[in-house]
Image: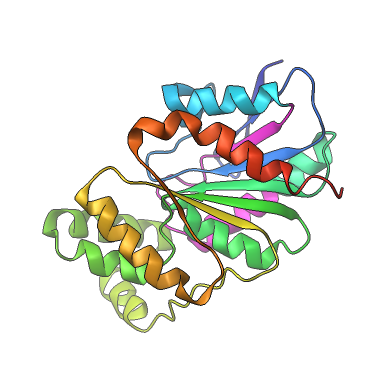
Amino acid sequence: MENRNFQMDTQWNVIHYPEKPTGFGILIIGDERHFVDENKCFWSQNEGKLAIINQFKESGYTIFSSNLYGRNWGSDHAVELAQRLYQQVIRSEILNNKVHLIAEGMGALVAVRLMEKMEGQLRSVVLLNPILSLKKHIALEKEHKFFYKKLMRELAAAYKKDQATLEMELENMNDEVNLNLGVPVKIINVISSGKSYTHSKLLQEILAKTQISPTYIVPEKKQQLGYMMKKFFNQYEKVL
């Protein structure tokens, strides 16, 4: 069996199985384009992402992911479901209970909260082009009216609140990001546009209080992502 799709709380989830499992697992939390349905997912439909999945499987990793309510923007529901998915997979599969975590874009908002809640259950974390502060991300998008309106509609749906209440809460939100939680973290940024450069500057601001130095790559080097992540993971697999 190459993969198994199943539902939890109306959301589809997928497990990708390696031919020769090593007992190490990887939880993937996708960006705003991510999806999982009854027979496919974004990471298996996207050519570049599929190459990474195949590299991981060849190295013996069991990979699992969830639809997580679509564009969840780090909502409580998404964080809770990600934890439940982890617990379900650990119970049903023969895996070491400390897993690696990959989060892309918006998925980093869930990942940071999981780092706080899943003490002792995460082996290492890789963040790809992460959005680490919802408050700062919204401030950036305010400059682009169309995208800002779309984002606020998505946030209202994800957080189940009206826009006025949401804007007030975001205004008062403490957006300190704590990545010093005892879990090894690697941040990889693919620089592909002026907008991603702006996000990189914002990232530098957020990381100023940490010891983390992001790795920057150009789009032409994206095929190296799988290798880079595996090399990072391997460093933290010596102690079970």
Q: Quadrant of residue 159?
A: bottom left
* Depicted 36 relative to depicted 98: above or below: above
Location of residue 96 in the rendering, given as x and y in whole percent from the top left corner = 83, 43
Look at 35% across and 76% down and name the residue there. 170
* Depicted 128 relative to depicted 74: above or below: above
Is 91 part of what is drawn in magenta?
A: no
Look at 68% across and 21% down and name the residue there. 58
Q: Quadrant of residue 221?
A: top left
Look at 47% across and 56% down and name the residue there. 214
Location of residue 35 in the rendering, given as x and y in whole percent from the top left corner = 45, 35
Location of residue 76 in the rendering, given as x and y in whole percent from the top left corner = 53, 63
Part of the protein shown in magenta: 60-85
Instruction: Determine whether, in the image, residue 10 is placed left or right of residue 239.
Output: left
- Of residue 147 and residue 190, the one placed in the foreground of this image is 190
Instruction: Determine whether, in the image, residue 234 is placed left or right of residue 219.
Output: right
**Count of number-bearing discs:** 0
Q: Visible in this render: residue 218?
A: yes
Is 62 part of what is drawn in magenta?
A: yes
Instruction: Determine whether, in the image, residue 73 is placed left or right of residue 233.
Output: left
Look at 56% across and 69% down and name the residue there. 211
Q: Visible in this render: residue 8?
A: no
Location of residue 93 in the rendering, given as x and y in whole percent from the top left corner = 81, 34
The image quadrant where one finds the N terminus is top right
- Of residue 30 and residue 150, the one placed in the foreground of this image is 30
